[in-house]
Amino acid sequence: MVERERQVGPDDEVTSERHYFISSSARAGAKTMGSLIRAHWSIENRCHWVLDVAFREDESRIRAGQQNIGLLRKIALDLLKQDQTTKRGIAAKRKKAGWDHDYLLRVLSGTIPPD
């Protein structure tokens, strides 16, 4: 088990957070556990956070077929990430694909030439 405590917030409103991590690996040292924890949050930040923000996944009221819609969102996220021609965020690229059919077709076909 690992316990991590950190203080966050501006100086006048500092709050403490305490996190506990449990692993089945009894031999993992502090360095290894730290790496595993950072790797977990790296995935959370790279994928799930983007889905929550750009696709407003947490606000979704879809009840039937959630796994199917989730898979489609992840595919759309991967396709939008492949567009390296602009520094726009995923939400802006998604909006552009909704308005610009030529851009949408380029994203879907994977043929995004430099502008």
Image (cartoon, helix red, strand yellow):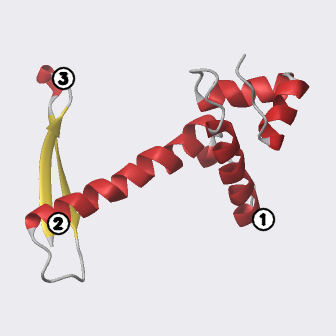
Left or right of 99 in this view: 6? left
**Mark 1 vs mark 2, CA separation in Å:** 38 Å
**Mark 3 vs mark 2, CA separation in Å:** 31 Å
Counting from the top left corner in percent of width and height, residue 102 is at: 89, 26
Residue under the image location 70 percent in, 65 percent down: 67
Counting from the top left corner in percent of width and height, residue 85 is at: 64, 23
Q: Nearer the viewer, mark 3 or mark 2?
A: 2
Residue under the image location 72 percent in, 31 percent down: 94
**Mark 1 vs mark 3, CA separation in Å:** 42 Å
Corner quadrant of residue 97: top right
Left or right of 53 in this view: 99? right
The residue that label 2 is drawn on is 32
- Between 106 and 53, the one lying in front of the other is 106
The quarter of the image holding the N terminus is bottom left
Q: Pointers 1 and 3 in contact (CB under 8 A)?
A: no
- Between 18 and 93, the one lying in front of the other is 93
The secondary structure type at the circle numbered 1 is loop
Disc 1 residue type (three-letter): Gly
Residue sticking out furthest to the right: 101
| N-terminal-most mark, 3 or 2 | 3
Residue under the image location 59 percent in, 45 percent down: 51
Residue sticking out furthest to the top: 115
Q: Which mark is residue 10?
A: 3
The secondary structure type at the circle numbered 3 is loop
